[in-house]
Image: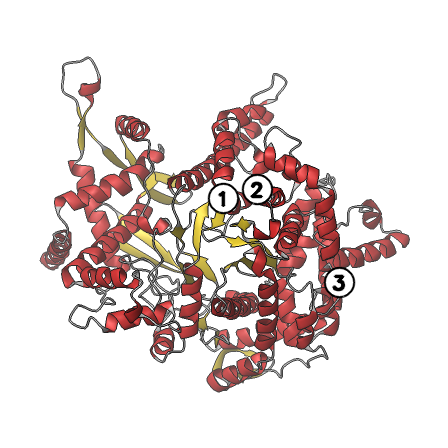
Amino acid sequence: NASNTKGRKSFANDRLVTFTKIFTAEELADIIFDDIFPLLCAQPNGMDVSFLCRHLGRLLFERFCSKYKQKTGVVEKVEKIAQLYCTNDESLSVNSECPRQKWEKISDSLPYLSSEELLPTYWPSKLRTTLAGYLLNILKNVAKVDTSLFTRTKETSIESCVVHSHNQDGYKLIGIMKVHPLISRLWHSYLNQLGEISFEVNKLPMVMPPRPWVSLTSGAYLLLHSDFVRTVSGQYKLHELSKASKEGQLSRIFDSLNYLGNCGWKVNTKILDIMLEMFNNKGDMKLDIIGPIETMMQQYDYKEDMTAIDKKTNKRLKKKLHHELFALRMDLLYKLSISNHYRDKIFWIPNNLDFRGRAYPIAPHCSHIGSDAARGLLLFAKGKKLGENGLNWIKVHLVNVHGHLKKSSLKERIEYADNHLEEIMDSADKPLTGKQWWREGTDPWQTLVACIEITNALRSPDPSSYVTYAPVHMDGSCNGLQHYASLGQDSYGARQVNLTPADKPQDVYSEVALLVEKARQRDASKGDTLAKELDGKITRKVVKQTVMTVVYGVTFVGGRLQIEKQLKEMGVSNDIIFKASVYIVKEVFKSLQEMFTSARQIQDWLTNSASQIALAGHCVDWVTPMGLPVVQPYHKETTERFRTKIQTVCSSHKFDYTQIPHLTKQKGGFPPNFVHSLDSTHMMMTSLRCEQEKMTFASVHDSFWTHACDIDKLNEFCRQEFVHLHELPILEDLKNHFDRKFSGLPLRKAVHGSSVASFNPLPKPGTFDVRQVLNSTYFFS
């Protein structure tokens, strides 16, 4: 037995050596130096070895994929296609061709070269982890430093560059890898001299239009592999997606993402220079510009009258704040550094989908899906004249991002902007030394961008001919509830979320706050002490977040915590804050049930259906109206242990499709995920209409962006496509899919006395006609 065990270990080591020979010693050293040492040097207390193994294993596989593509001719094929794709040769395209069709046509014209979709066999997590552990063990044993080189002593002192130890974490021992302090100092000195920050290529925008999506694995970056749908390895079987792709079912979705990716961007240099000036000085927390951390930590310095307990609490809060501020400052440093790098360039942002079909940029930095500061840094690369109504739409956009009159009529918003032209121009001319009216906005950086555009347009000889590059946004009005109201044909709910024509936009948050306040007054009149103490505390701001997220499945506990946070900011006493938040969240849920009866019934039907499917041993799945197969990847958590040369590595998996579905997550996740798949469908349908009109289009889920001159067209298209979407029998098709696939399957435990899966009838629809959306001014505004 001992000899067999020894033989197995020898075979495993030989196998790992074989894989290391794929790379040259120089390539392995580059990976360690460029990606592992920065992580170790940034953490003086050491890095978790399990994390390092997973991270290094991923990097090794990505490097292997690059070498594989080079060897098999994929690189040559992609380079040739890209050269022809970026030319304006009329023989390669016709006007009706989209980017996907053009790329496929060029690829078909080069049959003598390798297939550009050729990929190596995927390395399983065990192989990646054990290979990484093998290399880290070599690093630990081989990397040495002579510490005497940096002292005046003549004696040689050789020490390990990397130390492997274990820390106690509760009942567990955590493997930690640390670098020698001398190496850390040398590394930081090297970085200071270098003056640059390095990033992986797929963490940055592209300097050419992205490779069009033509299949599930072919798109986005030219050579780096990207998946069309973001999945974790082993998350679920992809045969449904593969089948849909081969049958051409995903073509319109490919085209929509290609259109989003072909939107060119550039940096707003004026905003960037202002941010850099603030970042390099004291910063400004209100504007999300984190300054030097030491200055901001002074408020937590010890006071003479502090007790020992106060000092301990203060130390803990100071440490927590330091970590938070450091993370925020580094995130901002990345954004500003990348923006400065692309200062004079046009760049593109490739996109892919999450499992629900929502589009996200692949590169996390310098994208329009981010904070107010991140959005303020971006402009469209292509400019357009304002035209007849463009200036008014920028004024509306200004008031929207400023936030003070967002729920007023369009006419009132334009008048508000006209009445504040002096402040607007002062903000544009003297953003840091003037009255700084722009700082009062909800989104101050986007407010400043709009101030600059309005000022430049008004000072031009002809405002209608002024060329603007700034995006103008049209946002859905509580978009999740809009979809629920349309699904249930709920007339009252539709009116609350602006699906019906009105002179002014309805504000569902204020309506809920009003209903909760009426309930409080009623209870106070009956002598309820808590209701009396909450007098004046029930505001729109207190209930807004809970109302916004209840449609996406927020629980009672989650809603209570949201309201508690708002009450704390209002100064409500800690003695009553728990009871107060419980009281308010109960009334919020009750009010929403009164206002959106149909939405609650549909949510309950979706939850009950998901429960039946999960108890039958399956994950909930459906097909979106655009044809995208969706599977909820929630399974029971499992833990794998891999023995590596350096230590045993544990890896937890929540997405292993071989395990039984996680009942609670399948039930709780289905209603919000289903609605997210609908809002992504609406976005894609709208984007394809905009593509037909050659408009610039970008989106952040239910916020659609284009040039000011095209807002009227965008408003028309997004309403028409919403109507087209909800004229489809969405719930009926979903129930038929469930009946066909899951009805009659045995359940793990009986539900309502039944031991087999069965689905209740759909809730009875109301009388709302979705075509009223076509005439609703404030559906998106």
Q: Circle 2 — which element?
A: helix
The residue at the point 47 percent across, 78 percent down is: 616
* Residue occupied by mark 1: 377
Q: Quadrant of residue 704?
A: bottom right
- Can residue 538 be seen at all in this image of the molecule? yes
Mark 1 residue crowding within 10 angstroms, few (<14) / some (14–19) / many (20+): many
Q: Circle 1 — which element?
A: loop
Does residue 365 sit above or below 89 in this rendering?
Answer: above
Q: Is residue 422 left or right of residue 233?
A: right
Dot label at residue 736: none
Q: Nearer the viewer, residue 660 or 598?
A: 598
* Residue occupied by mark 2: 445
Does residue 147 sit above or below 553 in this rendering?
Answer: above
Residue type for callout 3: Ser
**CA separation, marks 1 and 3?**
40 Å
Total number of numbered labels?
A: 3
Residue 119 position, x and y percent, is 23, 65
